Image (cartoon, grey):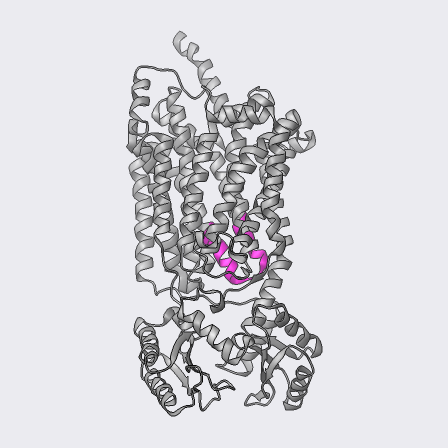
Amino acid sequence: MATFLYKLGRSAFRRRRLVALLWVALLAIAGIGAATAPAPTSGSFSIPGTEAQRAFDLLEERFPGAGADGATARVVFKAPEGQKVTDPAHKAVVEETVAALKSGSDQIVSVADPYATQAVSQNGSTAYVSVAYKVNAMELSDETREALTQAGQNAQGKGLTVEVGGDALQTMPATGAGEIVGVIIAGIVLVMTFGSLVAAGLPLLTAIIGVGIGVSSIAALANVLDLGSTTSTLAMMIGLAVGIDYALFIVSRYRAELAEGREKEDAAGRAVGTAGSAVVFAGLTVVIALVGLAVVNIPMLTKMGFAAAATVVIAVLIALTLIPALLGFAGDKVIGRKQRKGLKKGAASQTDKPNGGTRWARLVIRRPVTVLLIGVLGLGAIALPAASLEMGLPDDGVKPTSTTERRAYDALSDGFGPGFNGPLLVVVDGDKAAADKTVSSIKGLEGWAAVTPATPNKAGDAAMITVVPKDRPSSVATETLVHDIRDATGDDVLVTGATAMNIDFSQKMNDALVPYLALVVGLAFLLLTVVFRSILVPLKAALGFLLSVVAALGAVVAVFQWGWLGSLFGVEQTGPIMSMMPIFMVGVVFGLAMDYEVFLVTRMREAYVHGERPGEAIVTGFRHSARVVTAAAVIMIAVFSGFIGMTDQMIKMIGFGLAVAVLFDAFVVRMAIVPAVLALLGHKAWWLPKWLDRILPNVDVEGEGLAKRDEEVAGSKPDLVKA
């Protein structure tokens, strides 16, 4: 592989104008496609194989239109204490608002009068108007949203408290200044690492081009492939981080090759052949982890994984081709002025001198047991909150109290009971007698606040029953009620609704976690065994990852569920952790963690293969790679941290989780625990059974093929002279 990539790097360096033109053309094509494509929607949500999904499908079949995915809104009216919304003056305001809503947009399907639909609380303090739309939330026009909010504001100053809830107010996640700050921090770190503005600018430029192509392609295909509105945000988050890191490693190796006196074209080829090999395998681990999300069998999660994986593939291809091409344009400017002067004078390479990485590696080698215990116990302590993990899907109840959606949610809970915001929809596949029997069975259970009479369809072969739980949607009592209804009724009775979907979704996530871990870790273990030609090194890498990801989950629980340091990270309201968070973190963090494992340990393996003792190989690996790996980790943390400023709770949580996971994995696991374990194992770390060594393909990540090529060239020179 190293030889092939060496030739690819040299070719891209020589044909730099053509390579650069091709990537710019791809960016332009993707941009035009995104600009001309319809705006992305929120994406359809389904959970195949669950009872809630079967009920939803039956509802669509027997009650056409009842399960439509159009947006909804609730305009909630609350009378001052001691008064009622049925008082004539207040009733007039409500009816005036209903009329305004009906004429406010041609996207409206229906507006329900609360007095006609009995949407008034028993004490008369609260009423709500239900609004249904033809299209989903992402397709609502600005005029429609403005009409909705304006209707509420007009009624606000007329003696009633008016709040608006529902998904009709949902918009695309707002981009905060945090992402820009993250990129700026990445630029500063690159300048400090390279001492050259040109060298620092190359990874940023190529990462932006790669993300631009990836995100634009997602936007262009969003409606065709039914991609959710958050898919592009997650692809941008991951693509930007790995794009900068992959380019960083190749540029760094190119500078090292120049420092050893090689010609520019040869240095570019060697950088791609060696560091590029590590980039390929690091990218493969990320792709395996993201594509592996398909085993969960949730279309939304599968599409998110594939879209993000495609962006990673683009980042790898850009690092292997566009980076050497741009290095050809940069010339000597990729090296700082002082280093350029040193090269012109023929100064010796500085790469073999002791540095911070060397000193740290020697410290770890002297005290491996101490470092190992501190690292493991420290991460173990941070992981403890993960034992209290509570999962759920976000709704208006987890939004900040400053939002009208949250205040509408609270007003409905106060007026109609905590369970009103999460009603259960029971679908009966049978006639009226079966539906009436189901109603009686449900009323014999505990935990419900209201059970409506069965509503049959036109054919009379199915019916709907609405059950309002006593407790809030995310409570254990409500989950128990769902299971009790399912146990007390037959196979022809199905429970669905947002609350039941949430419960089934969380259960599906839990059931898929172990198979997913086995698949991803197993495939990555095989891949790393091929790369490092060792059994214990990949095993240690996988165990270290598990430690870092559980510690990251513990930090997420402490901040987002318990509220520790919540204000520091902009968490205004605590609540359950998003159901897909654990499995999504496992997928993404595993891929990113293996990046640092590959980049750091490959240098150690390279030194060991060339005859150094295990301890010396560890020091050599840190001398060459620690500074760059540290810079890469800081950059990735900065990029992920930038997304904590997003208004979308899911993106905020994922940004925080990935940032702390990289922090733990890069600086505790890879920089401390890994060298400590390798020091304790010694030669055994690189042991591989002979029969397995014969079977495994030799991918030549260390550049042995290039070394042999050098020897052959050197050996042929005397003959050329004689001739």
| Residue 559 drawn at (x, y percent) | 51, 53
| Residue 493 drawn at (x, y percent) | 65, 79
Q: Residue reaching furthest front?
A: 82
Quarter of the image where one finds residue 104:
bottom left
Q: Is residue 240 above or below residue 341?
A: below
Q: Which span is picked out in magenta?
A: 289-309
| Residue 624 seen in this snapshot | yes
Q: Is residue 359 above or below residue 12?
A: above
Quarter of the image where one finds residue 251:
top left
Quarter of the C terminus within the rendering: top left
Name the residue rendered at 47%, 46% in the picture: 659
Quarter of the image where one finds residue 231:
bottom left
Name the residue rendered at 40%, 75% in the picture: 164
Q: Is residue 66 above or below residue 27?
A: below
SS majority, magenta: helix
Q: Is residue 508 above or below residue 77?
A: above
